[in-house]
Amino acid sequence: MSASKDPEQAPTRSYGSGARILSIGIASTGLLTFAYFSIASHVLGESSAAQLDLLWSVMFVIISVIYRPIEQLLSRTIAGRRALGHEQHDLRIRS
């Protein structure tokens, strides 16, 4: 006798599982960035590596400063539309 699976009882990912994956991703990004800069400083020399470090830092700040307001505007727009009862929108969602 096979048991039918109830969609309401389907296992869901916990918050801890998602946070663990995110933490691993952030840590690996940090390690790869450190390795990149270590190799670059040995290959390029002190002066060129300093210029590369400066360029990387400036681009990181610019991208962070530009991206965050766009993300917040999108979130506010979606929340505002939902508050007004516009549940249907063209955004893609994971099924």
Image (cartoon, rainbow, N blue to C red):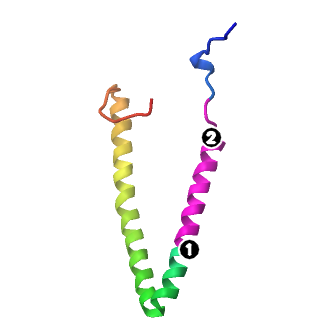
Where, quadrant-wise, is the N terminus in this rendering? Answer: top right
Closer to us: 67 or 1: 1
Element type where label 1 sits in the image: helix
Q: Position of residue 61 (x, y in %)?
A: 41, 69
Residue 82 vs 52, above or below: the answer is above
From the image, give the main secondary structure of the stretch colored magenta: helix
Furthest residue in direction top, as rendered: 1
Q: Could you say which disc has been placed on residue 15 in the image?
A: 2
Measured along the vertical axis of the image, is residue 88 above or below residue 79? above
Instruction: Using the rendered view, name the quadrant where residue 34 is placed.
Output: bottom right
Quadrant (top left, top right, bottom left, bottom right) of the C terminus: top left
Query: For the residues marked 1 and 2, what is the alpha-carbon distance in whole angstroms?
Result: 29 Å
Report the magenta residues as a range. 12-34
Q: Which mark is residue 34?
A: 1
Q: Amino acid at mark 1?
A: Phe
Residue lying at the far front of the rendered structure: 1
Q: Earlier in the sequence, mark 1 or mark 2?
A: 2
Q: Say what amino acid the circle numbered 2 marks.
A: Tyr
The residue drawn where x is 40% and y is 34% is 93
2 versus 95 height, above or below: above
The residue sitting at 38% across, 49% down in the picture is 72
Residue 44 position by quadrant: bottom left
Residue at the location (61% across, 55% down)?
23
User: SS at mark 2?
Assistant: helix
Specify whether residue 92 is painted magenta.
Answer: no
User: Which one is nearer the viewer's eye here, 94 or 74?
Assistant: 94
